[in-house]
Image (cartoon, helix red, strand yellow):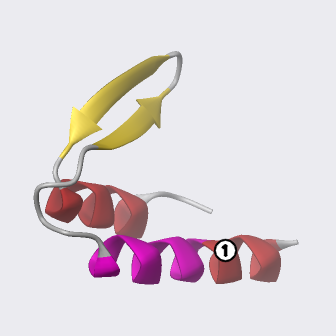
């Protein structure tokens, strides 16, 4: 189960890195969804606990 989450997380990180810098990205924190930059999204995903 943990391996599946890690593989999906890696897939999303690779996808984010390919996006143009000005692309709008939304990140869900609990019940709130906020707009973040590509770099912020990558940082948040890397810090996210499994």
Q: Where residue 28 appears, x then y in whole percent?
A: 46, 33
Asked whether, in this view, residue 36 is left or right of residue 8, the answer is left
Q: Quick one: 45 or 22, which is closer to the camera?
A: 22
Instruction: Report helix, strand or loop for mark 1.
Output: helix
Q: Quick one: 11 or 24, which is closer to the camera?
A: 24
Identify the residue at horizontal 25%, vertical 33% (top origin).
35
Q: Quadrant of residue 3?
A: bottom right
Q: Which span of residues is magenta-colored?
A: 9-18
Q: Callout 1: few (<14), some (14-19), or many (20+) C-alpha neighbours within 10 Å? A: few
Q: Where residue 41 appears, x then y in whole percent?
A: 29, 56
Q: Quadrant of the C terminus?
A: bottom right
Question: Is residue 10 in the magenta section?
Answer: yes
Q: Quadrant of the N terminus?
A: bottom right
Q: Is residue 37 above or below residue 15?
A: above
Number of marks in the image? 1
Identify the residue at horizontal 43%, vertical 83% (top origin).
14
Q: Is residue 36 above or below residue 35?
A: below
Q: Where residue 39 appears, x then y in whole percent?
A: 16, 64
- What residue would you read off at disc 1? 8
Identify the residue at horizontal 52%, vertical 23% (top origin).
30
Q: Where residue 49 appears, x then y in whole percent?
A: 53, 59
Q: Quadrant of residue 17?
A: bottom left
Asked whether, in this view, residue 30 is left or right of residue 32, the answer is right
In the rendered image, the residue lying farthest to the left is: 22
Asked whether, in this view, residue 28 is left or right of residue 9, the answer is left
Asked whether, in this view, residue 11 is left or right of residue 6, the answer is left
Q: Is residue 22 above or below residue 20?
A: above
Q: Quadrant of residue 11?
A: bottom right
């Amino acid at each position: 189960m943990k391996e599946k989450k890690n593989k999906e997380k890696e897939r999303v990180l690779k996808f984010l890195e390919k996006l143009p810098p000005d692309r709008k990205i939304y990140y869900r924190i609990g019940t709130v969804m906020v707009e973040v930059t590509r770099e912020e999204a990558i940082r948040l995903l890397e810090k996210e606990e499994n």
